[in-house]
Image: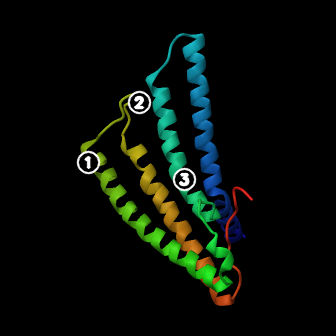
Amino acid sequence: MGGNVVRRILKQIDQNGERWLLLVFYSMIVMTIAIEVLRRFVLSYSSIWGEEIARYAFIYLVWIGVSAAVSERAHIRIDVLMHYLSPRGKAFVYLLGDFVMLIVALFALFYSFETLMTSIKFGSVTHGLRIAQAWFLAAVPFGFTLTCIRLIQSIWRDWGDMRGGRSVFEGHRLFD
């Protein structure tokens, strides 16, 4: 019974984890900006921390959004030629793209950890909040880690589809 609960929780995180995080950070941005606008125009007072919270929440929002786009295959692409390919050809093109993106993401992950470790080593802090800059620099490796996980899942799914002769998941289109 305990294993089923853990499995269901992990499945929910896999299906909706990025959405929940995106909702949290988006809400944080909206609430912070709304509070700051009210403070500035009603109370004639503003704070430096509001701008920083919104900025750093936006940074997390962007990097988590990259992972969400990869999992839904919702990133922008030009797929005119894809209509002329067989299911196996489409799978090959998607696999190639995912492998290239995985290599780039792994390089970016490595170098973003270097920046994070340097910040931790020297104890840099934010200007307004006066808290460790590392908390916000961690958004980049966090986002690239999620992206790498999603790319591996995509590669696994596409490989199975290609071997099984099935059509690959082509994602959701923004405009049809």
At which x and y percent is residue 51?
48, 29
Of labels 1 and 2, earlier in sequence is 1
Instruction: Give the structural element (helix, strand or loop) at label 1.
Output: helix
Q: Is residue 139 left or right of residue 84?
A: left
Kindly identify the amino acid type of the residue bearing the numbered disc 1.
Lys
**First-in-chain label (3 vs 2):** 3
Identity of the residue drawn at 41% across and 30% down: 129
Give the residue at mark 2. 129
* Real-space CA distance between mark 3 and mark 2, rounded to the nearest whole angstrom: 23 Å
Colour option used: rainbow
Which of the two marks, 3 or 1, is nearer to us in this view?
A: 3
- In the picture of the structure, the residue carrying the numbered disc 1 is 121
Q: Residue at left 61%, top 80%?
A: 91
Secondary structure state at the residue bearing disc 2 = loop
What distance separates the C-alpha of mark 1 from that of mark 2?
19 Å
99 and 16: which is toward the camera: 99
Query: How many angstroms separate mark 3 from mark 1 (CA)?
Result: 25 Å
133 sits left or right of 36 in the view: left
- Residue located beneath label 3 in the image: 64
Identified by mark 3, the residue type is Ile
Q: Find numbered disc 3 in the image and state the secondary structure of the residue it sits on.
A: helix
Label 2 neighbourhood size at 10 Å, few (<14), some (14-19), many (20+)? some
User: Comparing marks 3 and 2, which lies closer to the viewer?
Assistant: 3
The number of numbered discs placed on residues in the rendered structure image is 3
At 60% from the left and 11% from the top, the residue drawn is: 42
| Location of residue 161 (image quadrant) | bottom right
* Residue plotted at (70% across, 65% down): 8
